[in-house]
C-alpha cells in the first residue's frame, strides 16, 4: 500500500486541468456554448464552466457535474479522463 503523503500534489492538479480541457474540447466540437451547457446543468451563469475548464483558482468539476456533462454532451465519461 502506498502512503498518500508521498503523492505529489501536482498529480491532482494535472488531472483537474486535463478534465477541464477535455470538457472544453468536446463541448466545442459539439458547438455547445458555455452558456448553453451551464443552463442545461441548472446554473444561471457561465462562471463554473469557464473557470473549471481552465482550472482557474483551483475550481474544478466534481463527479456529479461530470456525469451530468457526459449525459448532456452524449459522451462516455471516460472521455474526460483521456491523457491523465
Image: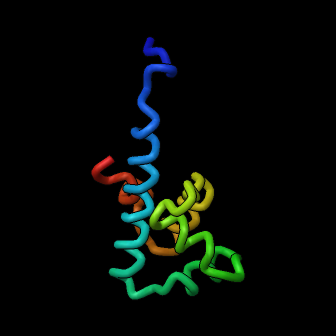
> Residue 53: horizontal and vertical position, in percent?
47, 67
Q: Is residue 13 above or below residue 7?
A: below
Q: Quadrant of residue 39?
A: bottom right
Residue for point 38% across, 52% down: 81
Residue at x 44%, y 20% (from the top left corner)? 6
The residue most toward the top is 1
Q: How many marks?
A: 0
Residue occupying the point 44% across, 72% down: 74
Side of 50 where 23 appears, left or right:
left
Q: Is residue 79 left or right of residue 34?
A: left
Where, by quadrant of the figure, is residue 41 drawn? Answer: bottom right
Q: Say how the picture is coloured.
A: rainbow
The residue shown at (39%, 47%) is 14
Q: Residue extending furthest front?
A: 57
Name the quarter where the N terminus is drawn: top left
Q: Position of residue 13 (x, y in %)?
A: 45, 46
Report x, y in % for residue 43. 69, 77
Q: Quadrant of residue 8?
A: top left
- Tell me residue 60's x, y (percent): 55, 57
**Looking at the image, is 23 positioned above or below residue 8?**
below
Amino acid at each position: 500500500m502506498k502512503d498518500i503523503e508521498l503523492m505529489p500534489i501536482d498529480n491532482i492538479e494535472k488531472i483537474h486541468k486535463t478534465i477541464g480541457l477535455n470538457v472544453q474540447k468536446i463541448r466545442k466540437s459539439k458547438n455547445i456554448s458555455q452558456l448553453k451547457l451551464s443552463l442545461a446543468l441548472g446554473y444561471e451563469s457561465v462562471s463554473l464552466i469557464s473557470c473549471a475548464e481552465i482550472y482557474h483558482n483551483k475550481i474544478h468539476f466534481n463527479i456529479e457535474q461530470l456525469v451530468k456533462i457526459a449525459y448532456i454532451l452524449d459522451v462516455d465519461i471516460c472521455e474526460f479522463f483521456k491523457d491523465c
